[in-house]
Amino acid sequence: MNISQNLEAWEALVLTAKTGNVSKTALLLDMDIPKVSRLISSLEKELGYELLDKSKRPFKPTKKCEIIVSLAEPILKSFRQMLDFSRGVAPKCLIRIGSPIEIMQEFYSQKLLAYSRTHPTVSFEVVPEAGPDALMNDEADILVVNKKLTDETNFVVRPFMQTSTPVLCSPEYLRRYGLPRTVDNLKKHTGLLLKTKTHLLTRFLYKGSQQSNLLQWKTLFLTHDQLAIKRLLLNHQGITTDLYFGHLLEEIKNGDLVPILPGWERSPWIMSLVTRRDRDLENSELRKFADWWAQSEADSALDRVVKGRRIIEQAQRNAAELFESLPFS
């Protein structure tokens, strides 16, 4: 039998084109590394041209290989489904979710595990936070995004929450460095800000329809992880405009963190679930899960926002006495 008629060889090629690593492919296929290499080399020999650029690490598929992979993937998927059906095995659905790391840890992980227990054919893989390109490049099946997409043409967008966040720091930080009375006074302070693939730096604050001047800081610390910002706040290291209050309601309630610059907030988080339109239409399990998750999050997020706003309003009232005793910066 020609190697080109061996589905195992095509599966080895497709996975290696994606992973860029023969060792990872061998692990995924439960196969010896030399066997994976032989299968791919045999394909190249029979076809008469290279499929992978092995001069680079990780390996890169050639242009021809990219086309072959796009044609082979649906065939391999259908073949696996046919085998499962013929063996009486329910088809499995793996849903890859791209999400900010901190909200996955704090709010989503338990919910996803619970869904898998009631839907045993559905499994989840959490992948790094990403933009819409990850859906188009087949690197994720669903994204949790925190701002409105600039172009929704190829996507199904399911909004579930909109909220903003106040400017926060610890009382001890204010005792050490003084209370900024205006947004412009932040230039004398350390800013703890969020920067991710999908979120550039917060450059303005808003009070109703009023926009602040461009934010300036004495010192900046940037991170992709909101929980890292939380730890730094609690260690009295700076001021943040970017920490979603759902991560620290107890700390605000207990007075460990206080909202400052009343009324000024960053632009709203516009939280949505995003899927690729064609995949949403063809994959009923993905569509059913996305509908359920959007509704579930809309309900639980609304509770968090209402509770959070009450706690913040009370914290602002409680902070008035503290502010009177603090030096201004």
Image (cartoon, rainbow, N blue to C red):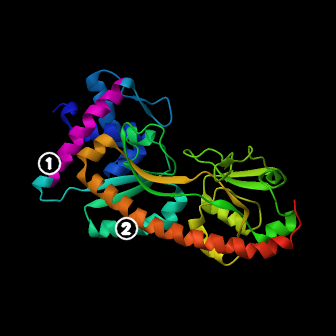
Residue 166 seen = yes
Residue linked to disc 2: 113
Disc 1 marks which amino acid?
Answer: Met
Question: Where is residue 42, by image quadrant?
Answer: top left
Question: Closest to the observer: 141 or 246?
Answer: 246
Label 2: which secondary element:
helix
Queried whether the magenta region covers residue 237, the answer comes back as no
Residue linked to disc 1: 82
Q: Residues within 10 Å of mark 1 (few under 14, many from 20)?
A: some
CA distance for labels 2 and 1: 27 Å
Q: Quadrant of the C terminus?
A: bottom right
Q: Position of residue 154 (x, y in %)?
A: 36, 37
Residue drawn 33% across and 31% down?
41
Give the number of marks: 2
Left or right: residue 99 versus residue 294 is right
Q: Position of residue 33 (x, y in %)?
A: 37, 45
Residue 21 seen = no
The residues colored magenta run 64-84
Q: Quadrant of the N terminus?
A: top left
Q: Earlier in the sequence, mark 2 or mark 1?
A: 1
Residue drawn 38% across and 58% down?
294
Relative to 221, say whether 13 is above or below.
above
